[in-house]
Image (cartoon, coloured by chain):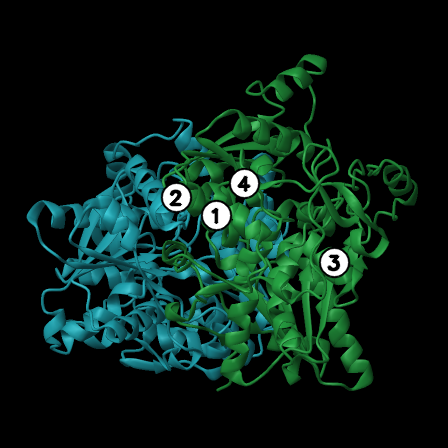
Chain colours: A cyan, B green
Amino acid sequence: MEATRILLDAADIPTHWYNVVADLPTPPAPPLGPDGKPATPEQMGAIFPGAILEQEMSAQRWIAIPEEVREIYRLWRPSPLVRAVRLEQALGTPAKIFFKYEGVSPAGSHKPNSAVPQAYYNRQAGIKRLTTETGAGQWGSSIAFAGQMFGLEVRVYMVKVSYGQKPYRRLMMQTWGAEVFASPSALTDTGRRLLAEDPDNPGSLGIAISEAVEEAASRADTNYTLGSVLNHVVLHQSIIGLEAKKQFDKVGLYPDIVIGPCGGGSSFAGIAFPFLADRAAGDRRAQDLRCIAVEPSSCPTLTKGQYAYDFGDASGFTPLMKMYTLGHDFMPPGIHAGGLRYHGDSPLVSQLFHEGLIEAAAVPQLATFEAGVQFARAEGIIPAPESCHAIRAAIDEALTCKARGESRTILFNLTGHGHFDMSSFERYFSGQLENYDYPADAVAASLAHLPRLG
Amino acid sequence: MEATRILLDAADIPTHWYNVVADLPTPPAPPLGPDGKPATPEQMGAIFPGAILEQEMSAQRWIAIPEEVREIYRLWRPSPLVRAVRLEQALGTPAKIFFKYEGVSPAGSHKPNSAVPQAYYNRQAGIKRLTTETGAGQWGSSIAFAGQMFGLEVRVYMVKVSYGQKPYRRLMMQTWGAEVFASPSALTDTGRRLLAEDPDNPGSLGIAISEAVEEAASRADTNYTLGSVLNHVVLHQSIIGLEAKKQFDKVGLYPDIVIGPCGGGSSFAGIAFPFLADRAAGDRRAQDLRCIAVEPSSCPTLTKGQYAYDFGDASGFTPLMKMYTLGHDFMPPGIHAGGLRYHGDSPLVSQLFHEGLIEAAAVPQLATFEAGVQFARAEGIIPAPESCHAIRAAIDEALTCKARGESRTILFNLTGHGHFDMSSFERYFSGQLENYDYPADAVAASLAHLPRLG
């Protein structure tokens, strides 16, 4: 009997995260402060603990995972690597399709991989309370879970329109003991100012970030957490690809193509970077490896953006980062893969793309849901809309293999289940979903506002 | 490092289901037809395939699981056995608490364990279409998934009030390709008659059963499926306990107490019966084994019901079964564990309880949610309201161990996750949930309507 689910024992959870910075051809461009000079750890120390800042700046290849973090990882990790045999059959492809299923975590996505160490390092630093922002709620629920595991208070600023529309994610956070506030809220100066201007302000991720950061910066016992983009988040997510490599070893295979959805970049980086390590180390199996970051065609940061210094948030609060960006004040269309609606991208993913070491693809919304439904009907699992982007690209690659009669091994990151996104499927089935055109004018306008340096 | 998740390989999925009938001290009382005489296979052949009927009547101890069924089981099975170390620590108990986590299935509960073989045997029999009823949607979504796996059309009659209130479960069924109708519907005589009387009829499980059975009985290519109560369903669910035994073997442990939530009985039977097999076989480890079926105190079938022949459905359509019952026209209070709102119980569970071989406990609603939240905060997983009943009893047993300074090994069936039940948690957190008094008068009235035999 051929195993379709390749499992590892708890003892096989990697002991170290992999840091791609050690294998970059050129050193990463530093984040810049408001004065245009490299941001100092001191500037960021108000909202992050020292251990996180060290990871953010580190060029060390392997960084040890604390045993306390591995203990929590063991609640759901190692996650399964699954061969999608029934999907292969449905497509009639000679390709082998594998997915790493991160939806088995308590929060239902890959996000706890970073939420858990972030909570741990903050508790080690004596922090009592974490703040964060959340849109659809995937990161908020992950940090709520992780905070509960380490006895930290968690306060989540949830974009007001999502607070009303996504009550179940909010309840998930509350079940894990977090306090959730509709943002803009009356708890911060930012929120009070905006509510005074417009009591019906629907909120935005940018506003929620500002509130969460403001609270963290103003209280010594409180820190801020971020769920993607930054180097330490990318580092923590490497657990995904590191496990996948062990699982492929178990069955004597190695992927030719590695695919991840790409918004802020951490889920793509998490599955792809550990394989890039092999290529950098001269591993023969990895010499022709292709890694594909898949983004929405309506928010095509890598494929249509500019590689430049820009703010990480809409309101220009964060340090400047060198990354692909559509402009920090670009407002992406309202696609249902909320986790991919980001104007920028991880600086590390951006640099690798800029240097030609990884690929990017942009896919339209309807085609992603079509792929997600085909996947659900073959493999059973109902995927999150973000994951549907990776599925779309994996199916497209498998169909290319079919057309060419080539047997390739394809791996994609199934970042989460869609149990809290069923209303998106309802809109898809009822024909209410649309493909947004690439908003070229809006991007041009927003790129014109890129900060000017020097 | 001590493993907290005990995993098995795909090859370890049991090859046979266990049939407790082979180990009963006395033969089961047969189901009776409308004439009071034992129901014949021919009477039931209009809605069930022969292989299912054989299993329903079988006294054979081990029944082979078809390879095609094991192939689908491998999409999520073997399910993990998890030691709830963090819950033990939170309780300060010397007891070891284990749970078998069935929420990893695509439909998120143990129900696919029976839906898959039911779909398989129907397809083998040349059936093209399955019907069923569903309330909260757990069984409906499981049969939608299973039907899709074997290329069968699935039509689900969903209680109208749930159809409106539980859109996400409905969408899950539609994602897997099933047709879902609000019941009463205009598709059956039963539905049309009721709608003519009252176009706003909110529906009930009894009505939905009648519609699904009517359609199945009236079409040669269509059969009916049921998600609990019957012997073949109990048989299929034995996969849960059989896997758990292998997992305990792996760590050299054996449970002293086995706990399952109990509505129709299949989830309790699924985890408990395979351990009863050991006791029947004289296994020394199982001689003091306690198996506890946990039911809602507002629908206390085993603890307050009568052991008698009664109809399985509200409208008296099914054969009569010898079981504990609160009377077939008893309408249980509207607790949120919809899967446990059943007037009767599996005849096999009933007989074992009647013969003193298993125990039963009844717990009030608020205490189950309290236990569920405590569990979620310790172990991460948010449990379904049905599962919260088992958690409540497991915590109570663990606290008894603490009071007595006894170290027992406790196993419970975590039958599913609560991702589609978050509105119940909302009502719990906001203080809107209540403990229903035991409806003694309603039960007495309904027991007065038990069918009279002979």
**Residue at disc 2, secondary structure:** helix
Residue A64 on image: x %, y %: 38, 83
Residue visible at 27% across and 78% down in the picture:
A59
Residue type at mark 3 is: Gln
Q: Which mark is residue B225?
A: 4
Subunit ID for the residue under disc 2? B
Instruction: Say whether disc 1 or disc 3 marks the residue closer to the N-terminus.
Output: 1
The kind of residue on which mark 4 rests is Thr
Q: Which residue is mark 2?
A: B124
Q: Are marks 2 and 3 on the same chain?
A: yes
Vertical position of residue A309 compared to residue B151: above or below: below
Q: Are marks 4 and 1 in contact (CB under 8 Å)?
A: no
Q: Are marks 4 and 3 on the same chain?
A: yes
Tag 2 and tag 1 share a subunit: yes
| Same-subunit check for callouts 4 and 1 | yes
Q: Residues within 10 Å of mark 4 (few under 14, many from 20)?
A: many
Per the image, the residue denoted by label 1 is B51
Closest to the observer, A178 or B377 = B377
Q: Chain of mark 1?
A: B
The picture places residue B426, in percent across and down from the top left corner, at 68, 47
Q: Earlier in the sequence, mark 2 or mark 4?
A: 2
Give the image quarter of residue A242: bottom left
Q: Does residue B146 appear left or right of residue B263 in this picture?
A: left
Quadrant in which residue A332 is drawn: top left
Q: Does the rendering let one see residue A370? A: yes
Q: Residues within 10 Å of mark 2 (few under 14, many from 20)?
A: some
Q: Amino acid at mark 2?
A: Gln
Q: Quadrant of residue A173?
A: bottom right
Residue B221 position (above or below residue A147): above
Label 3 resides on the chain identified as B
Marks 4 and 3: CB-CB under 8 Å?
A: no
Disc 2 to disc 4: CB gap under 8 Å? no
